[in-house]
């Protein structure tokens, strides 16, 4: 299954780490476009130059780890497609170019299911998507989440519960399932 990851999923960190961890576990094939990676870096820049540099560095590592993930939208698709927010057309265009199955986004209102279905694409929010992956593959998802939780503990100097961390990261259903 090919999944186009919107910038709003790449940033924030915990959500990205769980989503990418599931891809590293072989549960789906991630996709993004150069513009989505740039949007992630610009979002991180709002929190300082170090965050932007870290995002750009991680984007390079992700492209190396997933060489087929980077999908360039086609000009014809960019011109013919329509979405409520014209700034999101590039996401759908990249999804079409990459024969994507799902656009993973927290931005449901700007990706109407009917318009996506016309292009053979569906939409999922990260919590719903990861919960479905966990239901089908409980052990790998549980391990990914535990690895992310341990790293969050290390970086924050605090002890996070799985449920608390995932709730803060806007993935409460997955957190409840794993608690």
Image: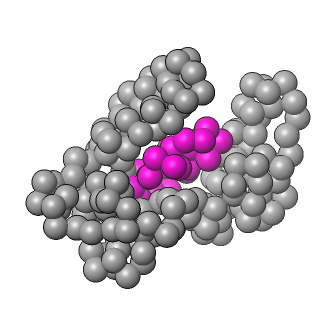
Residue 117: image quadrant is: bottom left
Point out residue 50 in the picture as x, y percentages from the top left corner.
Answer: 55, 17
- Tell me, yes or no, whether the highlighted magenta stretch contains residue 14: yes
* Side of 79 relative to 48 (left or right): left
Residue range in magenta is 1-30
Residue at the extreme front: 85
* Side of 46 relative to 171 (left or right): left
The residue shown at (52%, 18%) is: 49
Decide which of 174, 92 is in the foreground and name it. 92
Which quarter of the figure is the C terminus placed in?
A: bottom right
Point out residue 84 in the picture as x, y percentages from the top left corner.
Answer: 37, 68
The residue shown at (55%, 30%) is: 46
Please give the count of numbered marks on the rendered protein: 0
The residue shown at (86%, 45%) is: 161
Decide which of 51, 175 is in the foreground and name it. 51
- Tell me, yes or no, whether the highlighted magenta stretch contains residue 19: yes
Asked if residue 61 shows in the view, the reply is no
Point out residue 55 in the picture as x, y percentages from the top left corner.
Answer: 49, 28
Which quarter of the figure is the N terminus placed in?
A: bottom left
Asked if residue 130 shows in the view, the reply is yes
* Side of 40 relative to 48 (left or right): left
Q: On screen, 139 above or below 11?
A: below
* Side of 173 relative to 52 (left or right): right
Point out residue 85 in the picture as x, y percentages from the top left corner.
Answer: 38, 62
Decide which of 137, 170 is in the foreground and name it. 170
């Amino acid at each position: 299954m090919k999944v186009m990851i919107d910038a709003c999923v790449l940033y924030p960190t915990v959500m990205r780490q769980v989503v990418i961890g599931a891809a590293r576990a072989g549960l789906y094939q991630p996709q993004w476009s150069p513009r989505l990676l740039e949007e992630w870096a610009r979002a991180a820049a709002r929190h300082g130059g170090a965050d932007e540099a870290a995002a750009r560095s991680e984007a390079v590592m992700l492209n190396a780890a997933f060489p087929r993930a980077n999908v360039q939208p086609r000009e014809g698709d960019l011109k013919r497609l329509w979405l409520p927010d014209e700034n999101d057309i590039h996401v759908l265009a990249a999804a079409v170019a990459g024969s994507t199955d799902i656009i993973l986004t927290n931005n449901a209102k700007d990706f109407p299911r009917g318009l996506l279905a016309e292009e053979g694409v569906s939409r999922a929010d990260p919590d719903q998507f990861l919960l479905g992956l966990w239901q089908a593959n409980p052990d790998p998802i549980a391990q990914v989440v535990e690895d992310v939780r341990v790293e969050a503990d290390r970086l924050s100097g605090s002890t996070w519960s799985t449920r608390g961390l995932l709730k803060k990261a806007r993935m409460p259903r997955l957190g409840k399932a794993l608690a």
